[in-house]
Each structure stands twice: as C-alpha cells, then as structure tokens.
Image (cartoon, rainbow, N blue to C red):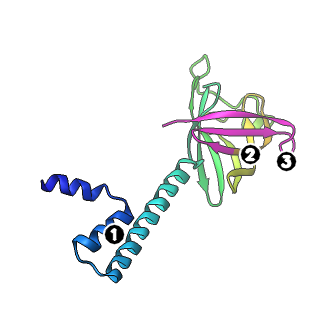
Amino acid sequence: YDFVKRKRELTMNIADRIQYLRKQKGYSQEELADIEKEMKKIVISMIIMLASISTYAQDVVGKWKLEDGTAIVEVYKQGDVFNGKIVWLQNPTEPDGTPAKDENNPDAKLRSRQLLGLNMLSGLKKDGGEYTGGNIYDPGNGKTYNCSMKVEGDVLKVRGSLDKKGLLGRTMDWFRVK
C-alpha cells in the first residue's frame, strides 16, 4: 500500500503536488509558496544545465575527419582564436617509408616539414554561432584560403574561399570523431 501511495505522490504535477501537501500534510499557504518557488528554481536549473550540455555539443574544439576520409584535424583554442592541426593521415608515409611532407608548399623552405602535426587552420574567431576571419591551408595544392566554419551537430561546415566574404569558394563537411 505504501508503495502505491508513494508512486502516486511522485507522478503528480506541481500544482497537484501543492494541493496534496496543503490538504494531506497540513502545510500553510506561505510554506506552499516557498515550496513552489524552490521547485521552480530546480526546474530552471535543470533547463540551464540541459542548455549548457547542448551548447557543449556544438563546440568546435575536438577532432574532425575530412569528408574524403584522408585526414583528421584537431581543432583547438589558443588564446581567443581557434586553430587546427593534422593529427592523423590515411597515408602518413611516402612510398619510400619517410613521413609525408608538405611538398606542394610555395615556400621551398617549408616543403620538408611533415604533414602530421601541421597547422592547417589558423586565426578563426568565434562570431555568434560561426567561426570566421581565419585561414585554411590546403597541403594538396599548397594554397591558403580565407576560412569560416560552423558546427551543425556532428558536422563541421568548413568554407574555404578566395574572398573574405566567402562568396568565391566551397564548403566541405568534416565529421566529428568520437
């Protein structure tokens, strides 16, 4: 009997619970008002907690696999900007077994640097729900483009463009690595 009674008490909505407390437990109107305020605080705290969890899920920081699956880039925050470095390559070595190099770089001095660990995203700043004002380096052709990004669930929309407004370029989908 106590189990059934307790189950009924737990499934009541807030208004029913307040009426129950007033009738069955003998609480005064002032006590009930205090209880109602505390219950509202708990509900608001839970809403804020859930909102912060969903905001965290939208965070750009983390590892992202390129849409062609050839690399994973780790996006990290450094000061007030976001950068990204290559942390995994599908083909990390050249046919001769040496580490893959940045051989298409227009600067001959940089062609000997390894692709693994290479910063390919730089200078992005959070602007509302987007990350803008940065650059993306494409080691495949040795060119650097203007870059902006936006997180949509587990997809990072990365836009590389010739112009700062992003009109002349293309958008790639990168996928969150869990």
* Mark toward the start of the polypeptide (1 vs 3): 1
- The answer to whether the residue labelled 1 contacts the one labelled 3, judged by CB atoms less than 8 Å apart, is no
Q: Which mark is residue 107?
A: none
Q: Which mark is residue 164?
A: 3
Label 2: how many residues lie within 10 Å, few (<14), some (14-19) or many (20+)? many
Label 1 SS: helix
Which residue type carries mark 2?
A: Ser
Number of numbered discs: 3
In the rendered image, the vertical position of residue 97 relative to residue 59, given as above or below: above
Which residue type carries mark 1?
A: Ile
Q: Position of residue 116 (x, y in %)?
A: 59, 34
Label 3: how many residues lie within 10 Å, few (<14), some (14-19) or many (20+)? some
Marks 2 and 3 sit apart, C-alpha to C-alpha, by 9 Å
Marks 1 and 3 sit apart, C-alpha to C-alpha, by 58 Å
Q: Quadrant of residue 174?
A: top right
Label 3 SS: loop
Q: Position of residue 151 (x, y in %)?
A: 63, 44
What range of the chain is rendered magenta?
A: 150-178
Q: Quadrant of residue 118?
A: top right
Q: Which of these two is toward me, 146 or 15? A: 15
Classified by dominant secondary structure, the portion drawn in magenta counts as strand
Marks 1 and 2 sit apart, C-alpha to C-alpha, by 52 Å
Identify residue for label 1: 18
Of badges 1 and 3, nearer the viewer stands: 1
* Mark toward the start of the polypeptide (1 vs 2): 1
Q: Which of these two is toward me, 58 or 60? A: 58
Q: Which of these two is toward me, 130 or 135? A: 130
Q: Which mark is residue 148?
A: 2
